[in-house]
């Protein structure tokens, strides 16, 4: 899927199929936008995810020095630093095998991002949406729907400009 309108259509189809009833149509963006951003971050980090997690595990006691170390490990396929990281073993795919703890696990995943990303996600009030989705038994379904496709939001597939258009 590389066509912008296909991706936008897929994302809004998720909204229609998952959020209907729990959210009014004009509220869908409160969920879809932050989760699309989260999926984008997840896709961008995929290349160096294991290296970052392993580095975190080896250095997690060095709290005051950990951020620069992890930033250096979070790179794209060309070795360019991404400017953000996530040290959680979770990603969109690995959240699914534990549906009973999905709310706690996704919160841990979100809080494992570097500060610049957690600031963005806080502006979306994502934890409030996670709580609402969880209470309505829709959180697992939403994450599952984002995984049920070849939706590749990595920069090699979707440019930053195109992501802006999608948003």
Image (tube, grey):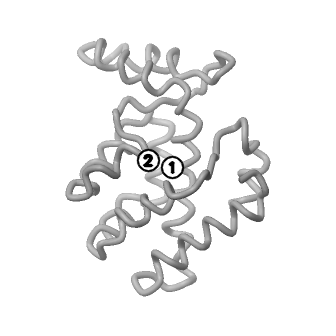
Location of residue 67 with respect to 16 vertically, above or below: above
Question: Residues at badges 2 and 1 in contact (C-beta under 8 Å)?
Answer: yes
Location of residue 65 with respect to 152 vertically, above or below: above
Q: In the rendered image, which quarter is residue 32 located in?
A: bottom right
Q: Which residue is drawn at the image coordinates 51% and 69% (left, top)? A: 30
Q: Nearer the viewer, residue 124 or 139?
A: 139
Q: Position of residue 27 (x, y in %)?
A: 52, 78
Q: Which residue is drawn at the image coordinates 58% and 27% (left, top)? A: 83
* Residue at the extreme left of the image, as rendered: 100
Helix, strand, or loop for circle 1? helix
Location of residue 21 with respect to 153 vertically, above or below: below
Q: Position of residue 125 (x, y in %)?
A: 43, 60
Q: Position of residue 106 (x, y in %)?
A: 33, 50
Q: In the rendered image, which quarter is residue 67 located in?
A: top left
Q: Which residue is mark 1?
A: 38
Q: Which residue is drawn at the image coordinates 28% and 55% (left, top)? A: 102
**Image-based side of 87 in relation to 26, left or right:** left
**Image-based side of 98 in relation to 148, left or right:** left
From the image, which quarter does the C terminus lie in?
Answer: bottom right
Q: Which residue is mark 2?
A: 92
- The dot on residue 123 is none
Q: Nearer the viewer, mark 2 or mark 1?
A: 2
Label 1 Cα crowd, 10 Å radius (few <14 / some 14-19 / many 20+): some
């Amino acid at each position: 899927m590389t066509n912008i309108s296909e991706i936008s259509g897929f994302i809004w189809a998720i909204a229609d199929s998952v959020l209907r009833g729990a959210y009014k149509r004009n509220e869908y963006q409160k969920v879809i936008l932050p989760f699309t951003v989260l999926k984008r971050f997840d896709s961008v980090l995929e290349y160096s995810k294991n290296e970052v997690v392993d580095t975190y595990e080896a250095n997690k006691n060095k709290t005051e020095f950990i951020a620069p170390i992890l930033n250096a490990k979070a790179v794209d396929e060309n070795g360019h630093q991404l400017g953000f990281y996530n040290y959680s073993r979770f990603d969109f795919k690995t959240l699914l095998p534990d549906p009973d703890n999905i709310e706690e696990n996704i919160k841990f995943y979100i809080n494992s991002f570097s500060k610049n990303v957690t600031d963005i996600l806080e502006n979306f009030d994502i934890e409030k949406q996670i709580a609402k989705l969880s209470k309505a038994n829709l959180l697992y379904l939403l994450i599952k729907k984002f995984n049920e496709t070849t939706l590749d939001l990595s920069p090699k597939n979707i440019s930053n400009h195109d992501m802006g258009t999608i948003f």
